[in-house]
Image (cartoon, rainbow, N blue to C red):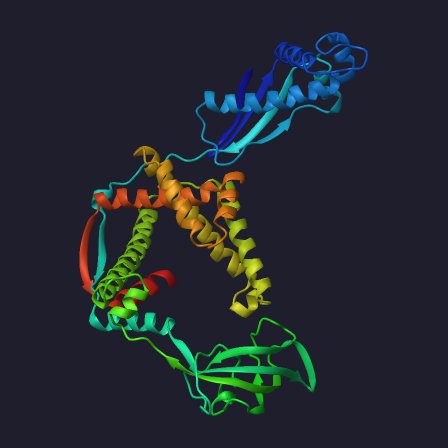
Amino acid sequence: MQITETINDGLKRTLKVVVGANELSERFDKRLDELRDQVQIKGFRKGKVPVAHIKKLYGKSLMSEVLEKAVNETSSQAIAERKERPALRPDISLDGDQAEMEKVIDGKADLAYSMTFEVLPEIPLADFSKLKLERLVAEVDAPSLDKALDDIANRSTSFEPEDGRTAASGDRVTIDFVGKIDGEAFEGGTGEGMGVVLGQGNMIPGFEDGLIGVKAGDEKTITATFPEAYPVKTLAGKAANFDIKVTEVARAVKPAIDDAFAQQLGLETGEKLKEAVGEQIKKEYEQAARMKLKRELLDELEKMHDFALPPSLVDFEFNQIWGQLEKSLKDQNKSLADEGKTEDEARAEYRTIAERRVRLGLVVGEIGDKNKIQVTQDELRRALIEHARRFPGQEKMVYEYFEKTPGALAELRAPIFEDKVVDHVLSQATLADRSVSRDELMQAVQATTEA
């Protein structure tokens, strides 16, 4: 194999690779021998078919197979020998016209091809000990704890039917209904035995208000209007009349935060419940503070590292982002004009985002590589278990997906790797803690996310 560099321009490389006819002949003969032991042809015992006969029957297809394998192996070998780091899979093109390729297939000419690719840039890492970052710390105060406990109690609220009760906010009203637009029933507008908790705002505007004051056995017509942004376009913005019959009115019974309630949740006492909820809130505050700290760290890493980006990587990332944007707009039946942007403005904005992602991805990868940061199998296993828990009853399907889908585990590995790199950099940086309230923390996180 001969390798000649024909282009070395910035990050772009083109190599010409020549695989001699003798080497191709050796590869072809080896493949013939392998096939001789496997092929079964009428009139011959297995393993006894003459090589000349196999060559006559399968020669051209075998040589095409040999050439394809030769290109794959020698291109990888060429990159390894030169210690290149391609940004993406090289673009390979065979040299010569059809007549030349026929000579190669007939074993009368060398195989020549060119491979073009971009290499990853050299990334001199900054001195992370010069980094100075602020870490927000929020304590769990009594109002936050009380609100969290109240939310738990609300989620455990039961409903008790009461004869003759007049429906008020917080009550559950069970109804049968038929919805009509311009006097005609519409698809999805009919139901029986549907429970509506008044005051939750789960129904279209005007519907819940129309149920205030009803009693079991009442029949009435409610007029309500579908929002302009309603996902069913045939209903969006239209007023509908709903003929309803009330079958039950039930009052809400909210449990007290006491030992009995705590025991229903698997804890010994009400105090233990408060401690557990307090720890959970503290963990949420810490996660929120880390999210803000991590974003600011990534911003600093981007500023500290300036190097040329492989255009192919930026294009790939941009196309991924742009494709997601187009799908999102289509799903919402919107256009860029609805977002107040021209296509040129949006493309410029999202290309900047793509460049940031590529730069940070390369920096994070370089930090991990230089410091031998790896994701262990145990860490991957825990991440997979945690991911599967998000799909109750479908855990087996989730495991099978990751087991059978090539590259799927990379979806789990990437965020773990990034977090380990972030921890490594933070261990060298100077961190100053600042105490804030819960609201200040959440506002800071929101501002960082929006930025």
* Foreground residue among 441 and 45: 45
Q: Quadrant of the C terminus?
A: bottom left
Q: Quadrant of the N terminus?
A: top right
Residue 451 in view in this figure = no
Question: Along the horizontal axis of the image, is 15 left or right of 178?
Answer: left
**Image location (x, y in percent) of residue 125:** 30, 38
Q: Residue at x 48, y 55 (%)?
A: 350
User: Eyeballing the image, is 215 above or below 15?
Assistant: below
User: Eyeballing the image, is 62 above or below 304?
Assistant: above
* Foreground residue among 31 and 312: 31
Hey, which quadrant is residue 327 in on the image? bottom right
Q: Residue at x 39, y 45 (%)?
A: 383
Residue 77 in view in this figure = yes
Count of picture labels: 0
Q: Residue at x 69, y 18 (%)?
A: 63
Q: Residue furthest right?
A: 43
* Foreground residue among 437 and 350: 437
Q: Residue at x 51, y 78 (%)?
A: 195
Hey, which quadrant is residue 68 in on the image? top right
* Foreground residue among 253 and 382: 253
User: Eyeballing the image, is 425 above or below 167?
Assistant: above
